Amino acid sequence: MSPVLFELLLRSIWETVLMTGASGLISLVFGLPLGLALVASDHGGIAESLWVNRSLGAIINGFRSVPFIILLVALIPVTRLIVGTSIGTWAAIVPLSIAATPYYARIAEVSLREVDHGLIEAARAMGGNRWTIVREVLVPEALPGIVAGFTVTLVTLVGASAMAGAIGAGGLGDLAIRYGYQRFETSVMVAVVVVLIVLVCGIQWIGDRLVARLDRRE
Amino acid sequence: MNQHVSAGLADPVHVQPTELEDVVRLVGLKRRFGATAALDGVSLTVKKGEILGIIGRSGAGKSTLIRCLNGLERPDSGEVFIEGREIGRLSERELQPLRRRIGMVFQHFNLLSAKTVEENVALPLKIEGRPRADRMARAAELLQLVGLSEKAKAYPASLSGGQKQRVGIARALAARPALLLSDEATSALDPETTRSILALLKDINSRLGLTILLITHEMEVIRSIADRVAVIDAGRIVEEGAVWQVFADPKSEITRSLLGGIRPQLPPGIASRLVAGEGVETILKVDVAGEAARGALLSDLAVTVPGPFRLVHGGIEHVQGQPVGTLFIAVLGVGAHLAQVTTFLRDRGARVEVLGHVAGPV
């Protein structure tokens, strides 16, 4: 591999890490409250409102049913509005975040829903309000699942970011397509695949370690 | 009641002490779930410092009843007074400070797995907004009370069932409640652990003077710690009274059936040989309580009514310090002698029931 290609590889790694990290963080910040809203508004929830629940669910399902490559193109006006441009790594973060947020919201929802209803009742019996229940019961008790779900989301984002090459965002996927596939640079292809495997394994390993440390259940 | 109200209007300060006597007062509580009535007009009072046990089969309405007391469940009609204050029309937000006056212990403990034992105990105080140092000091004090000081930093997952319930009790006491609700607190525990948890509750009741309302389906729990018992069936209180009196003289069928497990029963080997008509021996069931159980009943019987009789089965136990017992006596003969025996026993305050006759010696 030439020094030029090697430098390109390093840059692509950084772009992938940046896209995955930034959109992952954004999906966590918006997806977790969205997951909480879904659980809280559902039947028997702490802020039951079936109207809100159904509407949120429909919006989330809508976003989740659009293939990412189409979302990427369809969101170009939104991206331009937020980032100022529709091409490049930062521009890719917008559609990646918008795709990952409803995805993560659903994962968080599952973990939050699994919290034993008896614990919520205990907090209510102690005189706790909704915010107490969220802060002291729902989130801490669901934390292992919330973290494990975040790990899954990050790994999915690593894969999705490969498509972001279509709007000139760069990244490892883009490098593999343009150099490894279209220019028959087998060494680049192999290097990209190895880096991706290491990246995904690394994310999963850190996630698993964190979950093991957080999980105090039997 | 009338007098109470008029006195209250004339001199509100004067009635206060009598109202405070009743920590809980329920009036005509009703609650339906679809077609079934979980509560069908329940009226009940819990006096300051007493342990009231509510017993019933599963589905009798116990859980709904206890959950009405802290507003986790709203009755369809009727009134719930907690320390003289009606809570039925309070909003969720208004109920929150009131719930801090009421501790609750759960069958499945409901401890937070992500918090240490001391954090669990301190949680009600955190909800109250007390400073951390205060909370931890109180948690340490309570863990000492329940005998779990060395587990303060442990997580609930590492505790046994009995230890978890001790933490549950410590947590329920954290905010110094006026009332402790126990929702089948020992139903998930083995008999030995059950005894130690009940002893702890009794100890808390007598040391802190804490009023306790517990629900259970086990008469053993009632016998161990309750002062008064109320029997609930199909959403109604069918019987209520001092535990020893209800044990001695159960009025309703459901109470007798709930008592069946822990009161002496005629051994099946004899019961299967009972016939209604002729026989050599007559089997009597003699229920005694209070004075009748304290005296020399059987030796007096032998002296007063000559003729053979045998004690087949039975015994006397002490409930709340009162002797309560059931004796199964086989009396030779069926005629005048039998009549003399039953008359003597009834005169001495025993309840006598002729169960039947057996052909030969049992």
Image (cartoon, coloured by chain):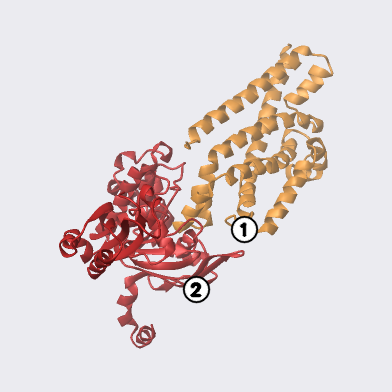
Chain colours: A orange, B red
How packed mark 2 is, by other alpha carbons closer than 10 Å (few <14, some 14-19, many 20 or more), is some
Residue occupied by mark 2: B78
Q: Foreground: B319 or B343? A: B343
Residue at coordinates 32% horizontally, 59% vertically from top-left? B285
Pinpoint residue A74: horizontal percent, then vertical percent. Answer: 82, 42
Location of the N terminus of chain A by quadrant is: top right
Would residue B297 appear left or right of A170 to someone viewing this image? left
Residue A48 — which label?
1
The secondary structure type at the circle numbered 1 is loop
Pinpoint residue B338: horizontal percent, then vertical percent. Answer: 27, 64
Q: Chain of mark 2?
A: B
How packed mark 1 is, by other alpha carbons closer than 10 Å (few <14, some 14-19, many 20 or more), is some
Q: Foreground: B262 or B243? A: B262
Measured Cα–Cα span from mark 2 to mark 1 = 26 Å
User: Hey, what amino acid is under mark 1?
Assistant: Glu
Q: Chain of mark 1?
A: A
Pinpoint residue A116: horizontal percent, then vertical percent. Answer: 53, 47
Pinpoint residue A99: horizontal percent, then vertical percent. Answer: 73, 40
